[in-house]
């Protein structure tokens, strides 16, 4: 299996720009008040475009990516986690949330370059809610930050669009969106500009759609991107996808990845075995991906998480996943708030992540299609103690794949609490798993 | 009379099988108190809440990640996989927490049932548009049941279902009034068994038994000291062993006078307020009931309800009962503790529960807690 072949590789041209954009995002949030702007924080799955109607000087900080960033800095993260635990917060709660609450209590905020500043208090908190934690996270965060106003939009309408009443579901979401807009006006004292909202919605949908297109190029053998690299690229869909600069960046990235796929440029020169994962990774232990690549030529080409946490997908009649057309590509000219919110709700509700949290059938179906369409050999499943939402259904998915003769390896860990992850023993499990499949260490390094 | 509740709970499976034989009806298992049982009664179906067996089982390991999913959800699934609920014709979930959702998914896949339904109950009890949305979901649920049972569920049927449930809730509220007395004529364990039984047997029969009990209660005097008046707050709690230990086996007297959890008062506290649109009336009841913490956002409305209970039942101390890994309650716990200690000035004690209760350790800890509240001088 997996003949040892050397594929051409090139570094990603967009890489440095991605790093700059990410640092800028956090600096913008920290500096927002100095510029007379507004700050809001909320879930990575929030409806990012909604606060955009308050002005061009509105900056966000989404909690999950911040939790992941924190986790990368192990010492700082440990302090946050221990602070949270001393404050009575249970250790098995979402590890992103614990990093976040811990930071508030410590009054310390870490930037992607490791600089620590005072915790930047938000003007308001706006989330969506699909897991047990989301809205409660910001409910408590608002209290800890000093009674910061908080709102969340319940998106648990089932595995849209595969539900009976799409219209009713969209209506429920748009009513909450409208309510949230009125609430934001009240708590900020600002007027609301529907043109800015519409522009932001179009940008956000473009970001999500183009990210999905980028993921399709990984159907190529060799994959032009590896999942570890993709973590640093998909993240903008969870930070500020509603900004034009981000949607434009994704188009630039798409053009580069498409070119790599056409020319057969590989993420890993020694790619010979393809896997997918199925959850957030252990952010403090990403070297495990490089271990797989370097030692075995095993490349993680993606996951429902990387592709579909925010990536916007549609399906052909034969079940093939294709990028969901942007609103403009769908021919939707949004001229009123009502039209815009309805289209936005329909677009966002198709999110894979929201479906995974609400339907086992969707999880199994999408996982199987990923394996077929991306030509995957095995699943490496992170039993992520940090997140019930991504863990729900994982073990059933494992049983389903084993019944279809797809090899599955599981390992325990935690996306945001490195105390729950043991790299050494995970590597031993990887070695045993790959050995059981007849895969020896790569001679090409 | 309270013995009857205990026996129903102890022999709930025998009861359900006998009910099926007696009536020829169907029995559906449900996993959360957000399931609108009125609609089952309207359909002539017996709804029975699924509970765990309080015994660890390795059968669930391939299906539920035991290092992070709560004991209750694992224990319930274990009961299903062990065949304890083999008489069920169907299973239903109303969307609430992720853990019990996992139980439902695995049950649907691995425990044969003729019918299953996942009701997309709104996740917020405060969101704009929630009533209409839930009404729509209830309409679809009703249609699904109609297709299964092969007949229409009429407004008259719904009225009957609502009345069966309302009467039962009202009667249990009357029983609860007795718990407000200085010396309640029942223990917390007896009250718990009454509520648990209401969730596993036909509420019509249960109501009859509660009515009889209400007649006894004014004259009933327990041969025990009330002692410290305790409240227990938490997620699912059918741990009768724990209640018995606190109320009967400690050297300091204590009585559980009220609870705020989903196997207790949260399940039956409010009634359906009739309106022309029966499904909307049912929707309102479930959205307006004392919230599970998973649905109590963005504002904290649960705490005001808790404060009211503390006052009405003259609570002196509170046990914060945390099912291990239960996220919704863990998320509320720090704020809840602050609320009790800073705003209500009521001492609290935190205990973490698992599938089995460590009675020995808990007795020492609870006794120590009671000691802090008793004036020995």
Image (cartoon, coloured by chain):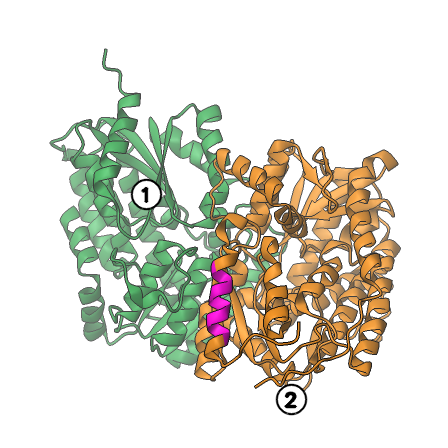
Chain colours: A orange, B green
Residue furthest to the left: B223
Whether residue A249 is visible here, answered yes or no, is yes
- Which residue lies at the image location 43% right of the left edge and 57% below the top edge? B34
Residue on which the image places disc 2? A318
- Which residue lies at the image location 71% right of the left edge and 57% below the top edge? A238
Residue A160, position as x, y percentages in the image: 62, 70
Q: Residues within 10 Å of mark 2 (few under 14, many from 20)?
A: few
Residue B322, position as x, y percentages in the image: 38, 43
The quadrant holding residue A208 is bottom right
Q: Badges 2 and 1: C-beta atoms under 8 Å apart? A: no
What number is the disc on residue B173? 1
Residue B80, position as x, y percentages in the image: 30, 68
Residue A291, position as x, y percentages in the image: 60, 65
Between A247 and A42, the residue placed more toward the observer is A247
Q: CA distance from mark 2 to mark 1?
A: 56 Å
Question: Does residue B293 appear to the left or right of A161 in the view shown?
Answer: left
User: Are labels 2 and 1 on one chain?
Assistant: no
Residue furthest to the bottom: A318
Whether residue A323 is visible here, answered yes or no, is no
What residue span does the magenta drawing correspond to?
Answer: A425-434
Question: Does residue B190 appear to the left or right of B94 in the view shown?
Answer: left
The quadrant holding residue B94 is bottom left
Secondary structure character of the magenta stretch overall: helix
Query: Does the stretch in magenta take in B153?
Result: no
């Amino acid at each position: 299996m997996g003949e040892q072949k050397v594929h051409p590789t090139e570094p990603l041209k967009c890489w440095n720009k991605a790093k700059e954009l990410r640092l800028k995002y956090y600096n913008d949030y920290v500096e927002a008040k100095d510029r007379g702007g507004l700050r809001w924080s909320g879930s990575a799955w929030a409806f990012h475009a909604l606060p955009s109607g308050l002005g061009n000087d509105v900056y966000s900080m989404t909690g999950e990516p911040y939790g992941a960033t924190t986790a990368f800095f192990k010492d700082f993260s440990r302090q946050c986690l221990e602070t949270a635990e001393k404050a009575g917060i249970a250790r098995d709660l979402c590890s992103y949330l614990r990093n976040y609450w811990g930071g508030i209590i410590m009054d310390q905020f870490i930037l992607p370059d490791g600089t620590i500043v005072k915790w930047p208090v938000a003007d308001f908190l706006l989330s969506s809610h699909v897991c047990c934690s989301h809205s409660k996270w910001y409910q408590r965060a608002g209290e800890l930050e000093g009674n910061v106003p908080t709102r969340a939009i319940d998106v648990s309408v089932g595995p849209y669009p595969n539900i009976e009443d799409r219209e009713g579901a969209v209506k429920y979401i748009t009513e909450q969106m409208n309510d949230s807009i009125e609430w934001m006006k009240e708590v900020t004292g600002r007027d609301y500009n529907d043109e800015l909202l519409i522009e932001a919605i179009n940008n956000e949908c473009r970001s999500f759609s183009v990210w999905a297109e980028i993921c399709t190029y990984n159907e190529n053998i060799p994959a032009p991107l590896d999942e570890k690299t993709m973590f640093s690229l998909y993240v903008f869909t969870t930070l500020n996808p509603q900004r034009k600069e981000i949607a434009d960046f994704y188009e630039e990235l798409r053009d580069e990845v498409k070119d790599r796929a056409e020319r057969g440029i590989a993420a890993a020169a020694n790619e010979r075995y393809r896997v997918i994962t199925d959850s957030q990774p252990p952010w403090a232990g990403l070297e495990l991906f490089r271990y797989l690549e370097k030692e075995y030529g095993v490349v993680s080409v993606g996951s429902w998480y990387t592709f579909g946490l925010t990536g916007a997908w549609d399906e052909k009649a034969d079940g093939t996943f294709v990028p969901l057309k942007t609103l403009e590509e769908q021919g939707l000219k949004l001229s009123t708030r009502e039209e815009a919110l309805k289209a936005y709700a329909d677009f966002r509700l198709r999110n894979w992540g929201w479906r995974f949290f609400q339907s086992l059938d969707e999880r199994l179906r999408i996982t199987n299609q990923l394996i077929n369409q991306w030509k995957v050999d095995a699943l490496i499943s992170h039993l992520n103690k940090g997140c019930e939402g991504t863990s729900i259904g994982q073990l059933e998915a494992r049983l389903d794949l084993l019944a279809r003769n797809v090899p599955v390896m599981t390992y325990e860990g935690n996306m945001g609490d490195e105390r729950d992850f043991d790299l050494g023993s995970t590597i031993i499990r990887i070695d045993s798993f790959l050995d059981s499949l007849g895969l020896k260490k790569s001679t090409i390094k | 009379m309270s013995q009857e509740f205990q026996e129903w709970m102890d022999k709930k499976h025998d009861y359900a099988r006998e009910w099926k034989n007696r009536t020829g009806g169907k029995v559906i298992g449900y996993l959360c108190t957000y399931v609108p049982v009125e609609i089952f009664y309207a359909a002539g179906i017996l709804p029975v809440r699924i509970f765990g067996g309080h015994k660890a089982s390795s059968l669930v390991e391939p299906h539920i990640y035991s290092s992070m999913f709560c004991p209750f959800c694992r224990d319930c699934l274990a009961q299903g996989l062990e065949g304890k609920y083999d008489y069920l014709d169907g299973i239903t979930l109303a969307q609430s927490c992720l853990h019990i959702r996992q139980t439902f998914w695995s049950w649907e896949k691995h425990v044969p049932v003729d019918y299953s339904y996942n009701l997309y109950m709104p996740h917020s009890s405060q969101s704009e548009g929630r009533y209409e949305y839930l009404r729509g979901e209830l309409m679809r649920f009703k249609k699904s049941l109609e297709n299964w049972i092969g007949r229409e569920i009429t407004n008259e049927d719904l009225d009957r279902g609502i009345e069966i449930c309302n009467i039962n809730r009202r009667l249990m509220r009357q029983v609860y009034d007795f718990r407000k007395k200085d010396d309640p004529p029942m223990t917390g364990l007896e009250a718990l068994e009454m509520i648990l039984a209401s969730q596993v047997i036909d509420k019509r029969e249960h109501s009859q038994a509660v009515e009889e009990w209400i007649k006894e209660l004014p004259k009933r005097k327990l041969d025990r000291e009330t002692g410290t008046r305790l409240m227990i707050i938490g997620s699912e709690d059918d741990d009768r062993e724990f209640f018995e230990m606190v109320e009967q086996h400690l050297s300091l007297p204590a009585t559980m006078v009220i609870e705020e959890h989903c196997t207790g008062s949260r399940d039956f506290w409010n009634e359906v307020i009739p309106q022309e649109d029966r499904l909307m009336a049912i929707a309102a009841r479930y959205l307006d009931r004392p919230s599970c913490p998973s649905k109590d956002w963005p504002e904290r409305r649960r705490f005001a309800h808790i404060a009211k209970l503390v006052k009405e039942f003259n609570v002196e101390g509170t046990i914060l009962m945390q099912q291990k890994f239960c996220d919704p309650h863990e998320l509320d716990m720090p704020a809840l503790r602050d609320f009790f200690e800073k705003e209500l000035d009521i001492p609290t004690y935190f205990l973490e529960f698992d599938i089995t209760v460590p009675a020995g350790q808990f007795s020492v800890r609870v006794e120590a807690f009671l000691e802090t509240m008793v004036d020995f001088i």
